Amino acid sequence: MIIICKHCKRNVKSRYSKRKYCSRKCAGASYKIRYKGRRKGRWVKIRCKYCNKIFEIPIHDINNRKFCSNKCRYKFPKSEVMRLKLSKRFLGKTYEEIYGKEKSDLIKKKKTKALLGKKNPMYGRKQREETKRKIGKSLLGNIPWNKGLPRENQPLYKVSPVNKKDLDEELIEKLYLKDKLILSEIAKIMGCSGFVIGRRIKLRGIKLREAKFKRGKEHPNWKGATKEDKLRVNWSSWRKIRYLILKRDIYCMSCGKRDGKLDVHHIDSNWRNNDLNNLILLCASCHKKVECDSIALPNMIKY
């Protein structure tokens, strides 16, 4: 279907019969011509926030339009664009009021992760004495949240036993070296945490024992070997068997390939039967085909 543009009067092909203009430029130009001289105050002059150019816009677009063109809009940083959009809509509101509890918690977690460790702009830096004084002055006159509350309503904080002088260090040393107790057992006797006792032992200049990880029958929770444990492959013996077959067959017994990955295949498809007459060397592609029954195994020579 051919349509005549109302602005430039050019013939244009289009699918839609209701189309009036050939492009957006023509539509904008005709819009300006139609509405510019109708009423006073219909069009307003504003300044572009990127290039400071003065341009005209209709009054109903005053809250949305901030740039003279799309070029200026894309060059302007996105963070500031979002700030300008959200400043009016969400001014003086919390995340919970805007998004709800679940979404606000996710946003807070993401923000904390974004500023952890080396991502933090203050990582490895120290504040100057001037900034510390300024922070102190800004906090002067602030009333603490628990001022005036009775002691019953105030939270109780336990004093850490590291700062206490009641702990008998000689007794801790005796229990650790002579009786050879674990830190957690000593902590129960002394009535504090294992971390505190470990710290006290280090301060005395004693080296901590290395924890020996026990396996199998030596482990205190050992309940005897299961069927699966008994049927497990001994990998050290399997490596020796694989080496013997690689030395014996040298290449793939199906296609004769020597390069690439070579696998050891069980002829009777029983992975526990590791007899040398039951094993054959195949390349990776032939091994897959044999397992899928798309290829028959070659006649095996008994060694």
Image: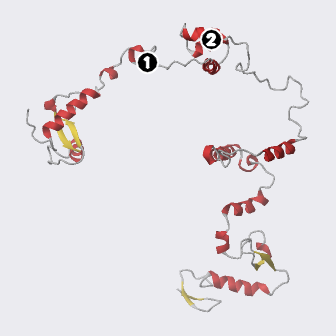
Q: Quadrant of residue 171?
A: top right
State how the image is colored: secondary structure
Badge 2: residue crowd in 10 Å (few <14, some 14–19, many ≥20): many
Residue 51 spot, x, y in % from top left: 72, 75
Observer-nearest of 187 and 199: 199
| Residue 199 x, y percent position in the rendering | 63, 21
Helix, strand, or loop for circle 1? Answer: loop
Name the kind of residue labelled 1 in the image. Lys
Is the residue 59 above or below the residue 139 in the image? below
Label annotation for residue 206? none
Residue 178 percent across, percent down from the top left: 54, 7
In percent of the image, x 18 and y 39: which residue is there?
281
Name the residue that disc number 2 marks. 172
Is 109 rendered above or below residue 188?
below
In the depicted view, which residue is nearer to us: 209 or 151? 209
Farthest bottom residue in view: 9
Few, some or many residues within 10 Å of mark 1 (<14, 14–19, 20+): few
Q: Is residue 251 left or right of residue 114?
A: left
**Position of residue 84 measured from the top left corner of the image (x, y, whole percent):** 75, 62
What residue appears at the point 59 percent right and 12 percent down from the top-left corner? 185
Question: Which residue is more in the foreground, 268 or 261?
Answer: 261
Secondary structure of residue under mark 2: helix
Residue 221 figure quarter: top left
Tell me the residue that label 1 is attached to.
214
